[in-house]
Image (cartoon, coloured by chain):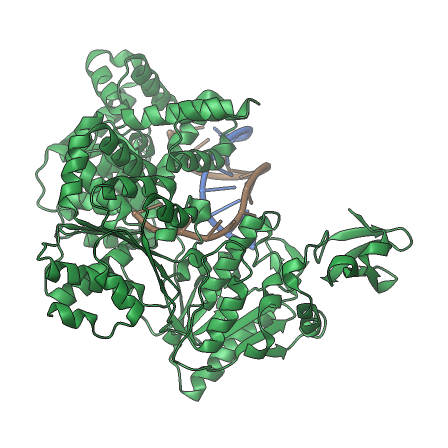
Chain colours: A green, B brown, C blue
Amino acid sequence: MPKDSLLEGLNPQQRDALLHTEGPLLILAGAGSGKTRVISHKFAYLLKAKRLTNKSIFAVTFTNKAANEMKERISSLTGKDMHGSWVGTFHSQCSKILRKTIDAMGYSRDFSIYDDDDQRNLIRHILREFKIHEALYRGVAARISALKSSLIGPEEFLSTGDGFGFDEKLARVYLRYRDELKKCNALDFDDLICLTLTLFEKHPEILKKYQDEFQYIFVDEFQDTNYAQYRFLRLLASAHRNVTVVGDDDQSIYRFRGADVTNVFRFEKDFTGARIIRLEQNYRSTQNILDVAGAVIARNPIRKEKKLWTGRGCGERVYHCWLSSEDEEAQHIAKTIKDFYLKGAYEYRDFAVLYRVNIQSRAVEEKLRDEGIPYRILGGIAFYQRKEIKDIIAYMRLILNHYDNVSFRRIINCPPRGIGAATLSRIEQEAKKRSLSLFEALKSTMKTNKSALKKSQDITDRLEQFIRLIEDVASEKYKTAAEMLKDIIDRTGYREFIDEERNENVDELIASAANTGIKDFAEKVALLTNLDDSPKENAVSLMTLHTAKGLEFPVVFVIGLEEGVLPYFKALDSPDEINEERRLLYVGMTRAKDVLLLTGAGKRRLYTKVQNQEPSRFLFDVPKECCQWIEKSTRTSLAQAPARRDADSSKRVFPYVAGCRVRHPKWGVGVVRDCYGDGEEQKVTVNFPNIGIKKLVLRFANLEKI
DNA sequence: AAAACTCCTCTTTTT
DNA sequence: GAGGAGTTTT
């Protein structure tokens, strides 16, 4: 395709973005505004206009899926083969750099990559050794990861710690964790980024090489970058400053994973003279959907103002339906899907049901089954996270990297081969005493000093067998990773150890390793969480709001719009987290092309308790004129909703929220049902047992929060 | 060292 | 209400 035709079909803002080739550019791309289109067209345009090879452009995404899509689009625009191009995820790009250069940092090039699960296992091991309550490992792992992605090392953290002892302990664990990783010749996900950054900082000649190589840089989903990623980019781009970042601060929903929206603001400051282009024309949804979503997100205080519009017209109203229980909600969803389907305008694959937490799918699944509606669940446990898959991969990793203690511990007795805790701890001791990895320690002790390990001839035999297994497979020359995996599975007898379903997963693993070299496969497995694209069945899609990001469907249900579900109860006492919940809803709503349906239920069972639920605060920001309210429940009716909406909700700063308990001097303890009015006129309705619902003016009522 | 039992936790999760 | 992990039992 000639370069000028790459401009065809782009709107004026998109063209601007494409033609601004030199210097920093921030594209604020609203939902559905065609950002992938812009990036791939610009990539293709640069190749043509500047006569570059695709190795001169560095483009990062967050997911493998996004990277593959981008490659495909560029390839179809230019006819060029994108293999060997620098289009990939942050982690894979960094890994690629490190596989060539990590010697400079004192690691060897066949390092293992640890995922969150491996990371947690190692941290647990350290906590056990330090005699710190082991159950804390998840929280500790999360905090260490947060520190790493903010580029705070253990030493630095210690000097800023709280001085109450806990942070000091955390710093010790962190320090130890970092050392252990190095001993294992392993990098966790955060290291992939941080070590590349450090490498660049410490070795200017290496940095220069990559700066010269990459004349242009693209970043997709920029709002999701963490601080380390930002610094990496800033450094890489600092020489020529030809960097295009594309993002939408309104769709930042991974704060809990370290994503830092303020990078969007940092960019403007650090790259002075950066051009900002807003993409506000939406090619996905109807105007009603955009207005509803826009009104909800507008309540967030700190954001880059955007006003999405579409040429598609108003479309159908946004439906809202309040049901009395989660079962009725599910029933309503199933019935609505059936009605739409029977009218013939939509296939099952056109529907998506989005929810905040995975358990919400259960009720929906049940009713869809009852109605005979096919469905599929997206997300959930990623393929490569399954236990059986991770076990086999651990064999492969130990074979490739004998220092990998985490993998060693994982498989030494899996499948069970009679090497228990006692033996393992003897190996651990030997390793510690002689500063060796577990596998080395086992090997050399077996040669020189069997008595340190053996209790019986039996155990000695088993240990020798294990060593032979690892070394035999390590020295074998396999043509593909699949052959190696098969060999591992046969030699360990792993198949007998697991049930049929898990065996099918093992088959799938082997299939995914066909035609792939061993190192390539190990890399792929480490950085790929899901097997790519499940076949597109004609079925209703169920998934969390997070999983839905980047997808679109003609008909979308966002369910569970209740206080405590969306916003989720854990977010309730932090404004930042409430704002993130709001963005989550925004992401969900903007997935819809034609029809958006919002539901909530007055009663829901969460884990073991049945709870009464109040409508989500976000519902009160929805402009009434875009909506059709369907009342199905009389008990906790939304009939009060329009009344509540009249209050200026931006000023609704209430000491109480619906559902909290208060004490009144005369009527005793009651439950707050509603808060409205502002300033001097703030009122609440409170339900007092045996007395009933009372309206109270806050100023006079003399309530006490309990 | 395996089996049986009990306890605990349960938000989201791109790599 | 279930799955995973740790602890006790055999």
Specify whether A376 is left or right of A599. left
Residue A175 image position (x, y, % from top left): 39, 24
* Depth order, front residue of A14/A701: A14
Residue A91 image position (x, y, % from top left): 27, 44
Residue A352, compared with residue A316, is above or below; it is above
* Depth order, front residue of A520/A369: A520
Residue plotted at (16% across, 45% down): A520
Q: How many marks?
A: 0
User: Dividing the picture into quarters, in which one does residue A22 lie?
Assistant: bottom left
Q: Quadrant of the N terminus of chain A?
A: bottom left
Q: Is residue A286 visible?
A: yes
Residue A613 image position (x, y, % from top left): 66, 61
Residue plotted at (61% across, 51% down): A572
Residue A58 image position (x, y, % from top left): 20, 50
User: Dividing the picture into quarters, in which one does residue A450 lie?
Assistant: top left
Return the residue found at the far bottom: A343
* Depth order, front residue of A528/A294: A294
Return the residue found at the far front: A273
Specify whether A256 is left or right of A393. right
Specify whether A543 is left or right of A460. right
Q: Is residue A627 visible?
A: no
Residue plotted at (12% across, 46% down): A517
User: Dividing the picture into quarters, in which one does residue A128 lie?
Assistant: top left
Return the residue found at the far right: A666
